[in-house]
Amino acid sequence: MNVQNIEKKENNTASFQVVVDADVFDKAVNQVYIRNRQDIYMPGFRKGKAPRKVIEGFYGKEIFFEEAVEDLADEAFGTGFAETGLKMVGRPTIENIDISDEKVLTYTFGVVLYPVVKLGEYRGIKAKKPEAEFDESRVTEELEAVRKRNARLIDVERPAQNGDRVTIDFEGFVDEVAFDGGKGDDYDLELGSGTFIPGFEDQVVGMSVGEQRDVNVTFPEEYTPELAGKAAVFKVTLKGVQEQELPELDDELAKDISDFDTMAEYTDHLREDLKKKFDEEQEGAYSAQLMEAAINVMEVEIPDVMVEDKLEEQLRTYASSMGMMPMDMTRDEILKALSIDYNTWSSVMRPQANFELNTELLLDAIAEAEKIEVSEEDFEQALKDMAETYGMEADQVRQYVNADVVKADLSRRKAAQIIRDNAIDAEPDPAPEAPAAEEAPSAE
């Protein structure tokens, strides 16, 4: 195979041709004949025994061409990918196929090129550091969450209240017809948690054990297409009510949930962790300002195919966080399992997808401009850090990670550090002046 007629076009696209020699194409045609001859009946021959020339003479010499062209397409594109030197994204398209009288096969492939970045000024960016201070209420809120996570559930004989754990049977109907996924038996629900459709939990409040009630709701517009925006009635039966008995924030609780002997020690440890997380959030917000400023002064056109690929990557990451195995599923299977409409997912996540792609392109361009290199020591340290995070040995981590992906991430981190190290802290906004006090009228 040989490559020819490489042509860059507008809109960051290109095309090239890959020519497949006649003997290579004929060999592929023969493989198709061997694969299919058992299913071809020819008069005068036992089934599967007819010679290729006889079949081609009867049906036409092109009978096996289409499959042979399909069989060779991946190899042909691989040759073009390797020899053109073009940096491509997404999947190629076959723009044309030509088979000469001499059985020379020529593919014309169309590809989208990796976007070219024109960097703006990324050193000396001015940005204001966040001025917020750590709020002690974060500790109080987390301690209350700890109490809730360790609460006892006690059966009560009274109408359900917000905060109670209730057990219900339910079945949903739209226009008096039951819909898929709208039925549940012995379902445990915390009232006020916002787990169900807006309005559902509020109408369960006040029900008593054994009571049946019609709960009327309207599905959100961003719900699955078959239910979005529709009114529904859920027939609900309340089967049990439990209230949460929260434990005291004492030393016994500290011993039960941690390695600390006293609640004071546990609280100090919690405060330290929350303060560290808060500082990381502040630094992250500052870094995001710098990144956005650098993005705003660079020039790049991101192909739609890259955005679509990023949206699918985000979807698979989300599915994985929900305990699914997205690598074994198609995109449509994931969407169905999560009850998500793709158009809704796309509209919500597209801004984030664009920001992530712009960030990656920016940092890759800076790494190239600054001639950033990732040493083997950097890579080994990254493996050690990952091993510590996941409680594994570095050699175990090495088996699961893609070295190129890890090194690309390290390169981007170094590029981001260049932006951060050369940033200029802008002066905070001046505090508003207090209005002048009105002069009190003098008493006469």
Image: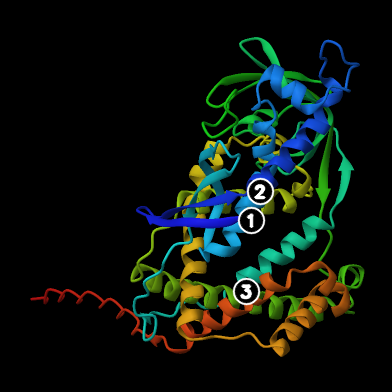
- Name the residue at 46% across, 79% down: 366
Image quarter where the C terminus lies is: bottom left
Residue 15 visible, this angle:
yes
Residue receiving disc 3: 409
The answer to which of 185 and 321 lies nearer the viewer is 321
- Residue that numbered label 2 is attached to: 74
Q: Are marks 2 and 1 in contact (CB under 8 Å)?
A: yes
Residue 288 horizontal/vertical position (percent) = 48, 71
Q: Tag 3: residue type?
A: Asp
**Where residue 212 sits: x, y (%)?**
76, 18
Asked whether residue 158 is in view, the answer is no
Residue 232's spot in the image, x, y percent? Answer: 61, 19
Asked if residue 181 lies left or right of residue 113, the reply is right
Q: Quadrant of the N terminus?
A: bottom right
Give me the residue at 61% from left, 39% from top: 103
Name the foreground residue: 272 vs 83: 83
